[in-house]
Amino acid sequence: LAKTTQPISMDSYEGQEVNITCSHNNIATNDYITWYQQFPSQGPRFIIQGYKTKVTNEVASLFIPADRKSSTLSLPRVSLSDTAVYYCLVGDKGGATNKLIFGTGTLLAVQP
Amino acid sequence: DTGVSQDPRHKITKRGQNVTFRCDPISEHNRLYWYRQTLGQGPEFLTYFQNEAQLEKSRLLSDRFSAERPKGSFSTLEIQRTEQGDSAMYLCASSFSQGHSYEQYFGPGTRLTVT
């Protein structure tokens, strides 16, 4: 199965840029890489999705190298409300491409 | 549209009992997913429907688990003969996706406690 790993936690201050990396060594060839944010006792919320190179939307950027074995979520100028757990989601190359694997999750703590 | 809804939000049951959860996806979404999440862990994929067809099931979904999506609308997840290890948050998500895109919208989850 695909193994997706992330740093367990990260600390930041308000106004800083935060980069969270996910390693996915066995990603399915045609699958997109998707990132989610989750607050306690809530379902995950979609942030951004990409296939390769760079994608940017109004809240984040996603950087994907050519080999697609990792991806980096970039949050510009974080605020206290960005304190949450962040997950990457990829499809598994080992089995059916519809079998989805969430990363281990990164707890981002933003301090004033 | 009010988003993905799940019912009930909380369920406490005794070991050995059967439970059923319901998920109502966003109305125009063709895909529906079920996940299980335990405390401190990421969601674990259980199963996935495209319209009414169940396209994939995880090995985590033992014979005691079954999911349906009649007519490609709402879905139910049933757990028979519950065990304490089934205690978790059960999340449903839906998407209107083509191909290998996984932009999903999640419901609030059903928290199951097996005593």
Image (cartoon, coloured by chain):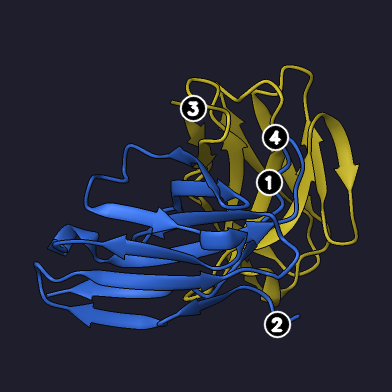
Mark number displayed over residue B2 = 2
Indicate the quadrant containing the N terminus of chain A: top left, top right, bottom left or bottom right.
top left
Q: Report the residue marked by disc 4.
A: A71
Image location (x, y in percent) of residue A32: 72, 36
Is residue A108 among what the camera can see?
Answer: no
Q: Calculate the distance from the C-alpha at mark 4 to the C-alpha at mark 1.
A: 15 Å
Chain of the residue displaying label 3: A
For label 2, the crowd category at 10 Å Cα-Cα, with few meaning under 14, some 14 to 19 and many 20 or more, is: few
Rendered hue of chain A is: yellow
Q: Position of residue A34 (x, y in %)?
A: 69, 45
Answer few, some or many: residues within 10 Å of disc 3's Cα (few below 14, many 20 plus, some between 14 and 19).
many
Report the chain shown in blue. Answer: B
Asked whether residue A73 is in view, the answer is yes
Task: Give me the disc on residue B102.
Answer: 1
Give the left or right position of residue B76, taking residue B80 as reference: right
Disc 4: CA contacts within 10 A as few (<14), some (14-19) or many (>=20): many
Q: CA distance from mark 4 to mark 2?
A: 32 Å
Q: CA distance from mark 3 to mark 4?
A: 14 Å
Lateral position of residue B31 relative to residue A1, left or right: right
Residue B1 x, y percent position in the rendering: 76, 80
Q: Residue at x 19, y 69 (%)?
A: B18
Give, as a three-letter code, the residue at label 1: Tyr
